[in-house]
Amino acid sequence: MTNKATSEKKAAFLKWMKKVGVWGFLFFLVKGLIWLAVGYWALK
């Protein structure tokens, strides 16, 4: 019973980490692109 509960918690944690990982990646990607655009605009 303990192994099943542990594996369910681990699966839920991994699912959460994957979701946060994708959103975190997208956030920093967009943030980086915005800063590149700001830098380009400032030097232009």
Image (cartoon, rainbow, N blue to C red):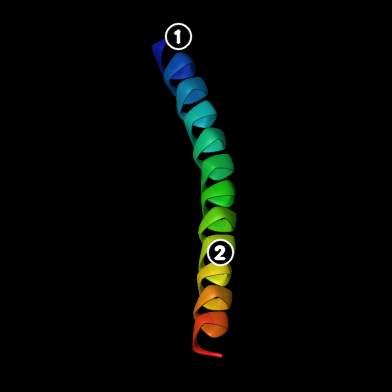
The x and y percentages for residue 13 are 48, 30
Question: Residue placed at 46% from the left, 14% from the top?
Answer: 5
Where does residue 4 sit, x and y in percent of width and height?
A: 49, 17
For residue 29, the mark is 2
2 or 1: mark nearer the eye: 2
Furthest residue toward bottom:
44
Residue that extends furthest to the top in the rendered view of this protein: 1
Which part of the image, by quadrant, shows the C terminus? bottom right
- Does label 2 or label 1 sit earlier along the sequence? 1
Quarter of the image with the N terminus is: top left
**Residue 34, image quadrant:** bottom right
C-alpha separation, residue under disc 2 versus residue under disc 1 = 42 Å
Looking at the image, is 3 positioned above or below residue 25? above
Kindly state the secondary structure of the residue where label 1 is placed.
Answer: loop
Residue highlighted by disc 1:
1
**Which element is circle 2 on?**
helix
Residue 33, above or below 5: below
Q: Position of residue 18 (x, y in %)?
A: 55, 44
Please say if 4 is above or below 32. Answer: above
Classify mark 2: residues with Cα within 10 Å, few (<14), some (14-19) or many (20+): few
Which residue is pictured at 49% across the width and 40% down the height? 17
Three-letter amino acid code of the residue under disc 1: Met
